[in-house]
Image (spheres, rainbow, N blue to C red):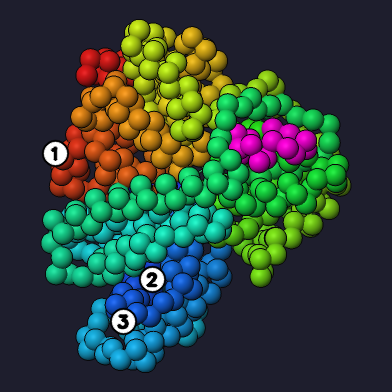
Amino acid sequence: MFCFQCQETAKGSGCTIKGVCGKTDDVANLQDLLIYVLKGISIYANQAGGLGVVRPDVNKFVMESLFATITNANFDKQVFIDRVREGLKIREGLKEDIVKAGGRIPENPHDSAVWYADTAAEFEVKAAQVGVLTTANEDVRSLRELLIYGLKGMAAYAEHALTLGYNDDGIFRFMLKALAATTDDSLSADDLVALVLEAGKYGVDVMALLDKANTTTYGNPELTKVEIGVRSNPGILISGHDLKDLEELLQQTEGSGVDVYTHGEMLPAHYYPAFKKYAHFAGNYGNAWWKQDKEFASFNGPILLTTNCLTPPKDSYKDRLYTTGVVGFAGVKHIADRKEGQPKDFSAIIEQAKKCPPPTEIESGEIVGGFAHAQVLSLADKVVEAVKSGAIKRFFVMAGCDGRMKSREYYTHFAQALPADTVILTAGCAKYKYNKLNLGDIGGIPRVLDAGQCNDSYSLAVIALKLKEVFGLDDVNELPISYNIAWYEQKAVIVLLALLYLGVKKIHLGPTLPAFLSPNVLKVLVEKFDIGGISSVEDDLKMFMTV
Ligand code: FS2
Ligand code: SF4
């Protein structure tokens, strides 16, 4: 195996024996093979699309497969064997479609478009031959992987939007075009850089689409106080990002005597008006994903993982853990997908919850959030006034991810060290590094404004663009906003590419820069966008406050 897609990659260069995340080498290789099969599918899907063949099932398969390979989404070998087999079937079906539509199958297509096998043993042999390192040129490899990781993030957001009935064919067309492009040896590094930047455009599109899906379905997030203590009923803990799963769980638990708590990236669900009507939607339990080994144990009741981030479960709670959607782990119970418009069936989780003791309290009090674009823009006059009067000197976008590394304490220290006339704009699980610090407010505006999940970074961009308009500026970079972003997995990659597409410069990325950026690719990003890493809190503060 060789995997370097996330921030915690071994030795900052690549996991080669087993993932730091717990991914085994056979699963890592099969994920590589699945991506390889997707490339073959894309080659034909692009051709078929040009002939007017419409295959939404292909889009869905590609999207879900990309999503399943995101860090901490799925560790189950059988899932990837089944997906590779299904992918090969889809690819062969596309070839038939092309011929039926009057097209001709290319004579010497890329190996990903012709390789075929039936058995799991054959898959494993091939899987070991198609990894990241098969691209010899390190800059081409870097750009291809940067593009693929961006697509993975894009796929995750597209999946959530599609689940709520929102779809944009342009996003799928780009996914297929970009996947196929990674097999094309005639493309230059410049061509690939252009594709990477184009991915940013679709990153903006997909986040806007998901924002529309979420806010149309569940209302605009609003200022909300969320309890972080516990009640006396048994509970179900729901984690991940899928709001539809949460909605159906709330409906099915209503009146059952079982409370529902959020964990990690599900916290922002409390900010949506549609979920406030559920009296048993009790609060948020715990912190970011990487603390689940302790927090799932002390929760005492069943836990539902709707998306990444799952970590390999401990025996103390494995029998209380459920996965759904693209998430999986061998030996952990999986809730099946919706059939024919019917909701998922969470009855097994609810029945188990009834037999469990209530959660053990680990914190008490409340946290405040709900500052997505609509809520912040409704406070726009107040915000603008505070900037004009000098009460707010600078905003710090500190969106992104949290993670295990001790070096991430930097973000807590940075938040604590920020002058009292600064405001943090956050989204994603990065917020857990400072959302319980009680940093106070500026004339009623909290100093930590949480927009929501990582995809709600879109809201932060909308807010920035609105401020630019209000202040009559030509360039978003003239605003008193600094970007000190923490990344971990591939959704952060698409968020980054989206911000670059919107013209944001001087983004600082930590706690370490991605291992998949070769020195030359990094140089391009530095030259074009002035991207940087982080150093010490003191030095960085000085640097940010003097720009
Ligand atoms: Fe956090 Fe994990 Fe949101 Fe990332 S819960 S690092 O996948 O997507 O952010
Ligand atoms: Fe390593 Fe991250 Fe890949 Fe897991 S996802 S194998 S930790 S690089």
Q: Nearer the viewer, residue 267 or 317?
A: 267
Residue 232 relative to residue 544: left or right: right
Residue 55 relative to residue 482: left or right: right
Q: Identify the residue at image location x=44%, y=76%.
A: 55
Which span of residues is magenta-colored? 268-283
Residue of label 2: 38
Instruction: Say which mark, if any, is on residue 51.
Output: 3
- Mark 3 and mark 2 lie on one chain; the one further toward the N terminus is 2
Residue 483, quarter of picture: top left
Residue 267 relative to residue 521: left or right: right
* Viewer can see residue 535: no
Name which residue type carries label 2. Leu
* Viewer can see residue 351: yes
Inspect the magenta stretch and tell me whether residue 107 lies in it. no
Name which residue type carries label 3. Leu
The percent position of residue 3, horizontal first and vertical second, equals 37, 56
